[in-house]
Amino acid sequence: MTDITRIGVAARYSDLVIHNGVAYFSGYVPETTLGQSVAAQTTDILDQIAQSLNEIGSDKSKILRATIWLTDMSSYAEMNAVWDQWVVPGHTPARACVESKLANPQYALEIQITAAV
C-alpha cells in the first residue's frame, strides 16, 4: 500500500495531498491583492504556488496540470501575460482555463495545479 500525505488538513479539504509522487493542490486564490488587477492577482497566486512547490521539494518545471478559473474571460490576455513569463519554457503543463463565478467577488481568478514531487 502506498502512503498518502495530507498537508493543511481542514474540515472540508486539505491544502495538498501527495500520493505516489504526485502532489494534488487545492485551488489558490489571491491573498494580498484582493480587488487589484488580474495581473497582480495572478502574480500573487503564482508566488504562492512556487512557495508551496518549494516546501515539498518540487518546482514549477514539475507542474503536470493546471486549471485556471477566471471570473471574466476578457482578462484572459492579462492573466496569460503573467503566466507566460512565469512558466518554464519547454515544461509547460497541460492546462484548462474557464470562466466561472468564484466564492469571493474580489477574486479575479483561482488556480489549481497537480505536480510531480
Image (tube, rainbow, N blue to C red):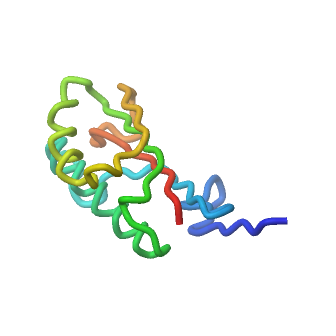
Q: Residue 10: x and y, percent?
A: 62, 62
Residue at figure coordinates x 47%, y 49% from the top left = 64
Q: Residue 25: x and y, percent?
A: 52, 55
Residue closest to the far right: 1
Q: Residue 43: x and y, percent?
A: 21, 54
Determine whether 90 is above or below 19 in the image: above
Determine whether 57 is above or below 64 in the image: below
Q: In which quarter of the image is residue 3?
A: bottom right
Q: Residue 75: x and y, percent?
A: 19, 30
Residue closest to the far front: 90
Residue at figure coordinates x 25%, y 51% from the top left = 89
Q: Quadrant of residue 8?
A: bottom right
Q: Is residue 6 left or right of residue 52?
A: right
Total label count?
Answer: 0
In the image, 31 versus 73, the foreground residue is 73
Residue at figure coordinates x 59%, y 59% from the top left = 22
Q: In which quarter of the image is the N terminus?
A: bottom right
In the image, 46 versus 36, the foreground residue is 46
Q: Quadrant of residue 74?
A: top left
Residue at figure coordinates x 43%, y 39% from the top left = 94
